[in-house]
């Protein structure tokens, strides 16, 4: 049976690389905003990194560019001033989990009704693929030429797990943008997280493992396989915390 | 009659849609778009309008009119 599908109204041509997960996320985000009736009443607080290209990917969208890593803090301020507006952060792993680790955890701790979205591509994408705290052991990047060595640089950091331990976080989940099934699941998490903000005034955080073919030196199809075969070993998919009815933990 | 529309100028030829198409209805064309990619094309005889290509496309190339 044919299914009706149409590009969300505010999206236009984007400038991300071929096969990049950011384009997938922005589509899922805007589909969710449209379905919730907030596509004309939202403010996106952008991190620094490839997520900053979000400005160029929308027409008439509302976005603020934050300082590096400070998006959750700015979003909390925006939400205070505009409580009726959907406010969310759109960050990469370098922004939310390294430079802005403190802000991410503080936002989860205070749990103001904002939503945090993190695209984790296991490296610093925008600056050319340097090693991130989220890079996997053995992963070759421009600053770990022989592969990441856990002996000297530690194991991959999992701030989503840390955030999920905070008492007032309503929903924390990790999805991957690497297959139709996982992309549909990511959409479910994104929509749920946004819904929690506007209907129950709660904080939620959603991480998505995102393909970065250019910096991983893989073809796009090899990149989505790499997520399935390697990245999920250290970043398992699923709901880490769900305090809503029927949500379990 | 359902229809699959392809905006060739948005396509960056990542190949996700071709990889996941359950009917092998999609392939790269030989022409180039303005971004110098060879955009995807559809074999209309094979397409079942399931929406998988839309789901996996990072560049909103596809539209399906049911």
Image (tube, coloured by chain):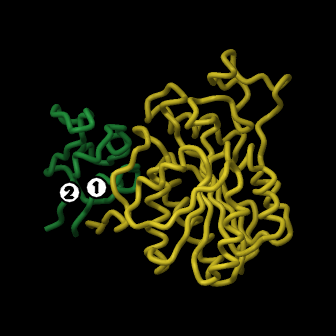
Chain colours: A yellow, B green
Q: B17 or A168: nearer the eye? A: A168
Residue A207 spot, x, y in % from top left: 64, 54
Check whether the beta carbons of the residues at disc 1 and disc 2 lie within 8 A of each other: yes
Residue A66 sits in quarter: bottom right
Q: Chain of mark 2?
A: B
Is A144 situated above or below A13?
above
Q: Is residue A197 shown left or right of residue A248?
A: left
Give the Cα separation between the discs numbered 1 and 2: 6 Å
Q: Which residue is mark 2?
A: B5
Of the two numbered discs 1 and 2 on the same chain, state the one appearing first in sequence.
Answer: 2
Compared with A248, A158 (above or below) is above
The answer to whether A39 appears left or right of A195 in the picture is left
> Mark number for residue B62?
1
The disc at residue A84 is none
Badge 1 and badge 2 both on one subunit? yes
User: What is the secondary structure assignment of the residue under circle 1?
Assistant: strand
Q: Measured from the top left, where is residue A102 in percent x and y?
A: 81, 53
- Bin the neighbour count of mark 1 within 10 Å (Cα to Cα): few under 14, some 14-19, many 20 and up: many
Q: Regarding mark 2 in the picture, which secondary structure is present there? A: strand
Residue at 36 percent across and 54 percent down: it is: B52
Closer to the camera, A87 or A163? Answer: A87
């Amino acid at each position: 049976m044919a299914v009706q599908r149409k590009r969300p109204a505010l999206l236009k041509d984007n400038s991300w690389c071929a096969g990049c997960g950011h384009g997938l996320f922005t589509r899922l985000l805007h589909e969710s905003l449209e379905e919730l009736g907030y596509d004309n009443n939202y403010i996106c607080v952008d991190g620094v990194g490839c997520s900053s290209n979000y400005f160029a990917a929308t027409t008439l969208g509302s976005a603020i560019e934050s300082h590096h890593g400070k998006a959750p803090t700015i979003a909390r301020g925006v939400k205070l001033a505009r409580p009726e507006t959907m406010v969310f952060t759109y960050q990469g792993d370098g922004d939310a989990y390294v430079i802005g680790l403190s802000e991410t955890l503080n936002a989860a701790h205070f749990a103001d009704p904002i939503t945090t979205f993190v695209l984790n591509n296991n490296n610093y994408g925008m600056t050319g693929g340097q090693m991130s705290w989220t890079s996997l052991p053995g992963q070759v990047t421009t600053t770990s030429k022989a592969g990441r060595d856990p002996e000297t640089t530690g194991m991959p950091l999992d701030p989503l797990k840390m955030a999920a331990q905070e008492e007032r976080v309503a929903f924390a989940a990790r999805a991957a943008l690497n297959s139709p099934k996982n992309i549909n699941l990511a959409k479910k998490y994104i929509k749920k997280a946004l819904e929690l903000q506007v209907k129950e005034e709660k904080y939620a955080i959603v991480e998505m493992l995102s393909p970065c073919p250019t910096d991983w030196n893989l073809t796009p199809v090899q990149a989505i396989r790499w997520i399935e075969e390697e990245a999920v070993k250290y970043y398992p998919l699923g709901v880490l915390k769900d305090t809503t009815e029927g949500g379990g933990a | 009659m359902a229809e699959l529309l392809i905006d060739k100028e948005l396509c960056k030829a990542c190949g996700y849609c071709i990889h996941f198409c359950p009917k092998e209805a999609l392939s790269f064309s030989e022409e180039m778009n303005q971004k110098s990619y060879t955009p995807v094309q559809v074999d209309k005889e094979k397409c079942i309008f399931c929406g998988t290509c839309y789901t996996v496309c990072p560049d909103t190339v596809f539209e399906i009119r049911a």
